[in-house]
Amino acid sequence: MATRNRTLLFRKYRNSLRSVRAPMTESKPGVGPVIEMASTSLLHPKRSYAPVSTEDPGNSSKGAVTVGLPPDWVDVSEEISVNIQRARTKMAELGKAHAKALMPSFGDGKEDQHQIESLTQEVTFLLRKSEKQLQRLSAGGPSEDSSVRKNVQRSLATDLQHLSMELRKKQSTYLKRLRLQKEDGGDLEMNLNGSSSRAEDDDFDDILFSEHQMSKIKKSEEISVEREKEIQQVVESVNELAQIMKDLSALVIDQGTIVDRIDYNIQNVASTVEDGLKQLQKAERTQRSGGMVKCASVLVILCFIMLILLILKEIFL
Amino acid sequence: MVLVTSVRDYINRMLHDISGMKVLILDSETVSNVSIVYSQSELLQKEVFLVEMIDSISVSKESMSHLKAVYFVRPTSDNIQKLRYQLANPRFGEHHLFFSNLLKDTQIHILADSDEHEAVQQVQEFYADFVAGDPYHFTLNMPSNHLYMLPAVVDPSGLQRYSDRVVDGIAALFLALKRRPVIRYQRTSDTAKRIAQETAKLMYQHESGLFDFRRTESSPLLLVIDRRDDPVTPLLNQWTYQAMVHELIGLQDNKVDLRAIASLPKDQQEVVLSSEQDAFFKSNMYENFGDIGMNIKRMVDDFQQVAKSNQNIQTVEDMARFVDNYPEYKKMQGNVSKHVTLVTEMSKLVEARKLMLVSQTEQDLACNGGQGAAYEAVTDLLNNESVSDIDRLRLVMLYALRYEKENPVQLMQLFNKLASRSPKYKPGLVQFLLKQAGVEKRTGDLFGNRDLMNIARNMARGLKGVENVYTQHQPLLFQTMESITRGRLRDVDYPFVGDHFQQGRPQEVVIFMVGGTTYEESRSVALQNATNSGIRFILGGTAVLNSKRFLLDLEEAQRIARSGSHMV
């Protein structure tokens, strides 16, 4: 893949032409408030600001990176991407907690359950919040800025959707494994019942066994009730995520379709600009004709007439 | 994968080194180059949040200095002027200029002159100056394609521009592949000769430093040939998926526009047919219509299975599974509807135009012998009311190309009948075609009736019978590729440019067809490459033709030739 860099030649010409031009021109106007960003990306977690004063552009050495202040909505998108990053780290923790809870342990396992619960809730909350903020990014109007906003929105929506799907996969595998364990617990119960029927012959053993049985049965009941509760919670979060997915799928681009083509999107922008213009013109026309104003005035006059009639009726009766 | 990968690599390089929010600015030609290999969602991943055309960007006054501008345009004087204007009033924080072909020094000078604000960060040449539709097929999408048919004296500046664009495209291809080829051309075509010689001059003299790549065992071969050596292939009706879509509906930059054909729901009005993105299309693009029908039915059955299981949601697990698989399900649904719609519309067209009947005669004209029977068949179809004008024209042209010298009386009768039946027929078009591509002008053995070997082969084929009457035709290109593979491409017919020679067989061959390629030929190339004969073929042309486009070029050339002769 051959390329050729013409920058050196370009700079040479530019400098020589500048020296020809310099004695004749004034100092050039500034570009507004500038913040120098060194190797930054507005949507990456790491960001480094290096403050710089407004230099005299005449002295600018090779490629001084001056980027103007971004508009406000960029802060919103920054926030969303930070939340997404946080959600990602929490999900990694959640994965570990799931694995730990599924391992057979002697303890009650209650702290594990609590941890899983809280982590799941946090992640779901972060995803929900990001999704709501994402809606704020939408803008009306066919300007260039709104195209940029829409595209940023789409890119973040795709990330969010991937995260949601990952979370759901983790949860469903956890659920499945949980169910399997519950069944094992059920088998244990069956064994108990089986042994209890055998012990009916011996009277003496009966009393002892029944007490033993009762405690065991109670314990397995408790375990299954706990498990039921967990499953219920997981199911709830699954439903919440389903809702998020539905909202997001409206924003995310379907790959491989016409909407994913660059030339289609460029044409579309052009036509939406035209459509927007037509709509604006139509709105202007309807507003000017002021149908509403006429209606309102007619109604007010009618009210007055009715009031007068009422007063007259009162006077004459 | 070669062509698509090279263009993608260029775009990746462009975007990778520049961090932050970017805007990509393209011109009307590079937008095709980029859109066909790169998707919008991939651009978003690279943080390109706005794509604009260089024409419309001067209109808006918004200052977006938080965006970095990446320009990817052709180095035409028009674009340079637009760039000048934008550099004088820079709207973006940074400006990175990438040109798809070689810049002249004067152009760099002009740009440097207008860059008073020092807004430009870099100026580079990234040679993605062709439209890579398929792995081994590219096109240059040239608008005034008909110029190759006219002698140079008619429109010298137009022909010069045409030739320059082709040379630029070929040069960009070889720079992207990092090769310098040995060049051969078709002796009988002036345009091909001119293009071959100018390409050689560029690669071996003007910019020989740039093209001085590491030598491999055997140099690749560039073969420049002329469409008029095989006028039959673009005139035939097609029955393999990709070629058929282009012939009946029209495929532009791998997009199909169905709005003119039928009224469809919004998401099916324009669809994408790309072998890179659509697995079903990739495995079916070279299959014939009957097989496609069966494969689509199978795909629909599979899809219905999935849909049924999705409706059967009883437990929470089912619900969870459904939501998990929803994006894939939606994608599958979109894909199934796309292919079903396409095949349905094409079936309708086949039925309405009686194409099964017409195509059978066309294939007979192209492949088998028998002048008398052919005359009968063509006359019958001309008399048939349901046959459309364009199909009648094609039949007469095919007959004329084959039986040009046999039985001129009957040929004249056919011309007259055609003129009387088709009101919109431009008189003399068939004769014009014969003048351009008649038997005297052609090099190759188009109908297999010159060379003894070919006659024998045809007879053998006739005896054996064909698998499918509708796809028996092999484009002439197939024979050319075979000759190259066997090392038997005749020097007399296809001389070398300058004093280059080729020892042994080349391992890479680029065939450039002046006047345009067809999808039937690109299929031939793909199938040839799949046989792993040790040679990799790449096919390119000035445009991708279907019969409508080829006839349009003929008409346009005829019109100009006529008006030119009036002036003289």
Image: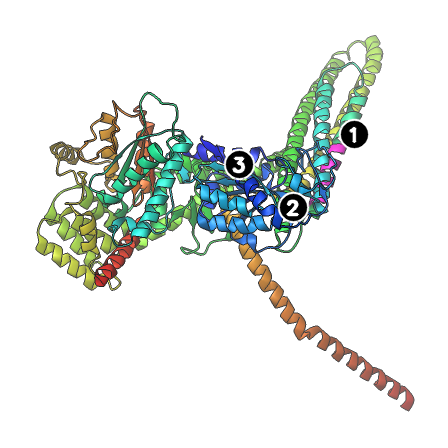
Position of residue B402 in the picture relative to residue B485 (left or right): left
Could you say where residue B211 lies in the image, as x and y percent from the top left?
Answer: 38, 30
Q: Residue furthest front?
A: A23
In terms of secondary structure, where does tag 1 sit? helix
Q: Quadrant of the N terminus of chain B?
A: top left
Residue type for callout 2: Ser
Give how far apart the Cα atoms at labels 3 and 2 are. 22 Å
Question: In the rendered structure, which segment of residues is drawn in magenta?
Answer: A121-134
Label 1 marks which chain's residue? A
Give how far apart the Cα atoms at labels 2 and 1 are. 43 Å
What residue is shown with label 1? A118
Is A126 contained in the magenta span? yes
- At label 1, counting other C-alpha atoms closer than 10 Å, the crowd grade (few under 14, some 14-19, many 20 or more) is few
Could you say where residue A53 lies in the image, as x and y percent from the top left?
Answer: 74, 39
What residue is shown with label 3? A7
Observer-side mark, 1 or 3, equals 3
Residue drawn at the location 54% of the way across and 55% of the way down: A270
Residue B460: quarter of image: top left
Label 1 close to label 3 by CB (< 8 Å): no
Position of residue B353 in the picture relative to residue B176 (left or right): left
